[in-house]
Image (cartoon, helix red, strand yellow):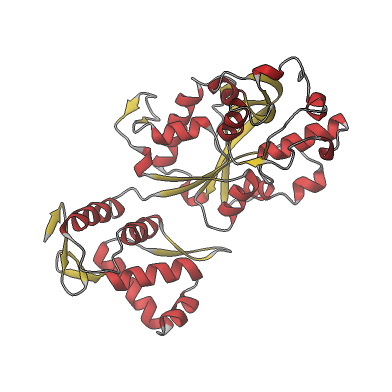
Amino acid sequence: MSKIPSLAIEFTANATLRIGSSEVDLVELTRCLRTLADTQSITAAANVLGVTYRTLWGRMLSFDAALGCKLIGKARGRGTQLTGKGRALLAALERHGALFLPPPPEPVAALTTDLARALRDRPLLRLMASHDYAIARAINARRGVSPASGQSASVDLSELIHLSNAGSVDCVRSLLQGDADLAGYHHVTTTASERANSPWERVESDSDFWSLPIMEREQGIIVAPRAKRQIESIADIAREGIRFVNRQRGSGTRILLDAWLSDAGISPSRIEGYDQEEFTHQAVAATVAAGAADAGPGLKAAAAQFNLGFIPLTTETYRLAGAVDTRTHETVAALIAATHQQAAKLPGYRVLAAARR
């Protein structure tokens, strides 16, 4: 038996989690959590598992009682969702293949550590963010910042937040659909009609969510040193012989680029490489630095990282948004403080200390 504070796991024919006098079948727990995560409905999950609604509901209540925390909850317009601890627990179980038992001794120790982490007071938050240097560095720095003092603290945000990157549109949609707890995004001002139908309009106006502008970033065109004389404005990327690399459709930077082209009266069909897509600012800059393209849209910070030229075109606002139940979460405060600390060190960034809506 492997022991850690207040948690012991005994592996018999099946894996059994023992906390005090309570026992939990980890195989059954994994099946229930995975099915609920996939269906987002107790009724549908019960049908998949071949049990009644009442039986599945009773099992989840018994799991809650044994583990001392709620694993599922209902959210308006989003059905049944796993809670932060429910998601963290499922991730730990699936990461170590709890369905294939008995495991060898070393994985047992790793699993017990992950389960203890999943069941502690601070659940894992899912952050879906448009690629940003400050946020990535804040989470990967292994040390957080105390929001009260602004000083470094022994908080490892990588253990509290699961970061994944996508375009701004997909990030906000993931938040709206309950597939993310937090969203990092940026967008340009559009027409009233376009804004009314945009995903961020709901996030910024719906009381089920909060949205906070956390920093400003310089966006423009990243230019290879060899092409600086040929590319001095947005119009020059359409010149014959200029090779371009773009951001993916749906990203905030792609939306910005298309707005710049429209304002300049340039058709995308005139740009060689308009359909060649990369998924981060860093990837665009790396492509230019490697000589595979002469220019691409991106941040001043990305250009500086690779010692490339940069044509500034706009300063945009980057926002962090979340479901209302994360509004006062201490991990969110630590993330914002750490992001501000990193943003202050980056070229083309400016920290915004706006009040949360």
192 lies left or right of 57: right
**Residue closer to the observer: 212 or 45:** 45
Whether residue 357 is visible here, answered yes or no, is: no
The residue that appears at 44% across and 31% down in the rendered structure is 137
The residue that appears at 70% across and 21% down in the rendered structure is 312
Q: Quadrant of residue 143?
A: top left
Position of residue 89 measured from the top left corner of the image (x, y, whole percent): 33, 59
Position of residue 7 measured from the top left corner of the image (x, y, whole percent): 18, 57
Whether residue 85 is visible here, answered yes or no, is: yes
**With respect to residue 187, does 75 lie above or below?**
below
**With respect to residue 69, does 39 lie above or below?**
below
**With respect to residue 109, does 260 lie above or below?**
above
Q: Quadrant of residue 294?
A: top right
**Residue closer to the observer: 194 or 234:** 234
344 lies left or right of 22: right
Q: Quadrant of residue 290?
A: top right
Q: Give the quadrant of the C terminus.
A: top right
The total number of labels drawn is 0
Position of residue 136 measured from the top left corner of the image (x, y, whole percent): 47, 35
The residue that appears at 73% across and 37% down in the rendered structure is 273
**Residue closer to the observer: 210 or 280:** 280
